[in-house]
Image: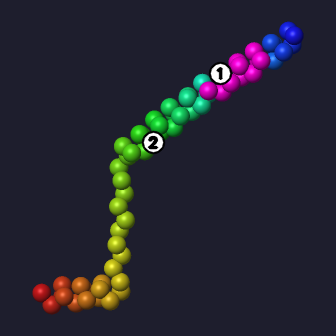
Amino acid sequence: MSSLGFSYGHLYVQQKRQKEKQKKMDNEKSKANENDNNKKKIHPVVIASKEESQSEIQNSSTK
């Protein structure tokens, strides 16, 4: 009977440690997400087509 109690105790401790580990990982993950949100965002650059570039050059040279 004592081995049954020991096995249960061992599982209880294992589960408790796993829950603590999961909480710690979740906290670290949420902190990492907060830090990512605070970083400066980079906006994509729109590249003009070749024809638009040439028409802009021609318009600027005629002025």
The residue wearing badge 1 is 16
Q: Amino acid at mark 1?
A: Lys
Q: Judge from the rendering whether residue 2 lies leftward or rightward of residue 16; answer left or right.
A: right
Using a 10 Å C-alpha cutoff, classify the residue at mark 2 as few (fewer than 14 neighbours), some (14 to 19) or many (20 or more). Answer: few
- Quadrant position of residue 51: bottom left
Disc 2 + disc 1, Cβ < 8 Å: no
> In the image, is 36 to the left or to the right of 51?
right
Q: Residue at x 60, y 31 (%)?
A: 22
Residue 33: assigned label: 2
Question: Which residue is found at the position 34% from the left and 72% from the top?
Answer: 46
The quadrant the C terminus occupies is bottom left
Q: Nearer the viewer, residue 2 or 13?
A: 2
* Mark 2 and mark 1: Cα distance apart in space: 26 Å
Coordinates of residue 26 in the picture (x, y in percent)? 53, 34
Question: Closer to the camera, 36 or 11?
Answer: 11
Q: Residue furthest top?
A: 2
Range drawn in magenta:
8-19
Q: Is residue 16 above or below residue 45?
A: above
Q: Nearer the viewer, mark 2 or mark 1?
A: 1
Per the picture, the main secondary structure of the magenta-coloured stretch is: helix
| Residue 14 falls in image quadrant | top right
User: Residue 50 in the image: x percent, y percent?
Assistant: 36, 86
